[in-house]
Image (cartoon, rainbow, N blue to C red):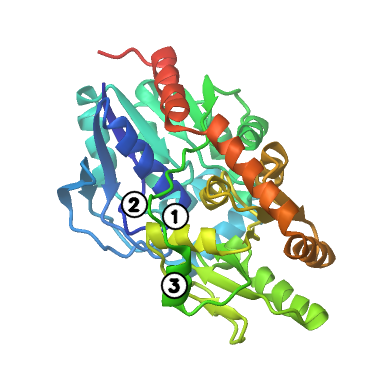
């Protein structure tokens, strides 16, 4: 088959769940099919600032075709239209369509390419329902499209245009059962055939967690957060909780952050920011830490939690996020909290009980090995395509 992946931004340097998921799926499928990625020149996920040149290039063996963005995202304008569409019941369908355009990254050239070259591809796999290229591009090829919504429990999923949109593709690939349930609840017209695929994790060989700690000046014990340091990821709440925890408990434990910051990081001797981590460094950090903490209130999957389990590390996650909570229950790979008091008690429990902490990590790894190897993920994608789309 010839498969086109369509996504808002693409590159090995990009830190983002949907971007990483798309890239690794495209790379795995490229071993069995002709794969091309259709994306934009944007690199920054907030403003859509260009970071790539338009045209063709090869990324990890996959052909990537980039199209120009028409404008950067105006954050003040986008906030105004978001407030209108989310909270004012008098808003119109035109307002919601304007929300999609302003959310971006706006690339009419990419959408025209999909329309004009649709006969060259057997199937289009669109990533992330909320972005311009997915909403307008999928409408050009609904019968040849598979949607990967990456939907979260946030206000955008409730917009009326999406309740119709979710019924449009030939099939849907969900990341978790909770995402499938969410999209099913908001879709007024039912859903097309679907599969829940999750994600497979590859742990690099020859890791050196002790060397990593020495190079980065880290001391035991520490808990780890990996991802964008962002309010949308719950990091402001994590900073408050952790600093209050230290006042309450006064125990020697550090919070180490791995990822780019879109939020001021508190100046505190026990909060250490490492900035961007390479893939190898990320797994070395996971093996060196006591546990991974994930405070995000909105997730459709959360790959780093799966990476922690595959590394044999337990997790402590925000129980208010249904996806994180239910993943934790299914895997047995960690604990979750609903409040500051529960954060303190569960963190204390895990730090004070290394045998239980290690047992949770082993259980998480067994769960990953039994359910989320590449043979499972790729097989589900190919089965859904075979069920829904006539191919050459």
Q: In the image, 296: left or right of 59? A: right
Residue 45 visible in rendering? no
Q: Residue at x 74, y 52 (%)?
A: 356
Tell which residue pokes out farthest to the left in this image: 56
Q: In the image, which is nearer the foreground, mark 1 or mark 3?
A: 3
- Vertical placement of residue 278 versus 108, above or below: below
Mark 2, residue position: 9
- The crowding category of the residue bearing disc 3, from other C-alpha atoms within 10 Å (few below 14, some 14 to 19, many at least 20), is some
Q: Which mark is residue 143?
A: none
In this view, 190 is above or below 319: above
Residue located 32% across and 65% down the image: 49
Left or right relative to 324: residue 122: left
Q: Secondary structure at mark 3?
A: loop
Judging depth in this view, the residue of 316 and 4 nearest the camera is 316
Residue 197 as seen in the image, left or right of residue 356: left
Q: Is residue 241 visible?
A: yes
Eye-nearest disc, 3 or 2: 3
| Disc 1 + disc 2, Cβ < 8 Å | yes
Q: Which residue is mark 3?
A: 275
Q: Quadrant of residue 177?
A: top right
Quadrant of residue 147 within the rendered picture = top left
Which numbered disc flags the more N-terminal residue, 3 or 2? Answer: 2
Image location of residue 65, percent across then percent down: 20, 44
Mark closer to the chain start, 1 or 3: 1
Residue 158 position within the rendered picture, expressed as x and y whole percent measured from the top left? 63, 43
Position of residue 313 measured from the top left corner of the image (x, y, whole percent): 60, 53
Identify residue for label 1.
16
Observer-nearest of 303 and 190: 303
Q: Position of residue 229 (x, y in %)?
A: 53, 68
Structural crowding at the residue carrying mark 2, measured as other residues with C-alpha within 10 Å and reported as few (<14), some (14–19) or many (≥20): many
């Amino acid at each position: 088959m010839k498969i086109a992946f369509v996504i808002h931004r693409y590159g090995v340097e990009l830190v983002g769940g949907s971007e990483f998921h798309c890239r690794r799926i495209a790379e795995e499928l490229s071993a069995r099919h002709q794969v091309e990625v259709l994306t934009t020149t944007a690199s920054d996920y907030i403003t859509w600032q260009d970071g790539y040149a338009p045209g063709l290039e090869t990324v990890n063996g996959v052909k990537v075709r980039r199209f120009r963005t028409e404008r950067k995202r105006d954050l003040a304008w986008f906030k105004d239209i978001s407030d209108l569409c989310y909270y004012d019941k008098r808003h119109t369908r035109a307002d919601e369509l304007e929300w999609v355009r302003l959310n971006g990254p706006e690339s009419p050239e990419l959408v025209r390419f999909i329309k004009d070259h649709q006969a060259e591809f057997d199937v289009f796999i669109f990533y992330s329902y909320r972005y311009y290229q997915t909403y307008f591009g999928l409408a050009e090829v609904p019968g040849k499209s598979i949607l990967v919504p990456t939907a979260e429990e946030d206000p955008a999923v409730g917009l009326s245009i999406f309740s119709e949109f979710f019924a449009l593709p030939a099939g849907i690939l969900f990341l978790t059962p909770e995402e499938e349930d969410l999209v099913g609840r908001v879709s007024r017209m039912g859903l097309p055939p679907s599969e829940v695929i999750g994600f497979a994790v590859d742990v690099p060989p020859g890791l050196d967690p002790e060397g990593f700690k020495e190079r980065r000046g880290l001391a035991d014990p520490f808990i780890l957060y990996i991802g964008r340091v962002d309010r949308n990821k719950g990091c402001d709440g994590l900073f408050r909780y952790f600093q209050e925890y230290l006042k309450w408990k006064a125990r020697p434990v550090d919070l180490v952050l791995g990822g780019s910051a879109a939020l001021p990081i508190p100046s505190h001797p026990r909060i250490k920011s490492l900035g961007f981590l390479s893939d190898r460094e990320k797994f070395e950090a996971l093996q060196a830490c006591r546990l991974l903490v994930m405070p995000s209130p909105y997730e459709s999957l959360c790959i780093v939690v799966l990476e922690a389990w595959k590394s044999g590390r337990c997790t402590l996650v925000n129980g208010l996020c249904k996806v994180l909570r239910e993943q934790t229950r299914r895997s047995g790979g960690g604990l979750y909290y609903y409040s500051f008091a529960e954060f303190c008690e569960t963190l204390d429990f895990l730090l004070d009980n290394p045998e239980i902490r290690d047992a949770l990590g082993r259980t998480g790894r067994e769960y990953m090995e039994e359910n989320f190897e590449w043979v499972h993920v790729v097989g589900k994608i190919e089965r859904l395509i075979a069920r829904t789309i006539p191919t050459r």
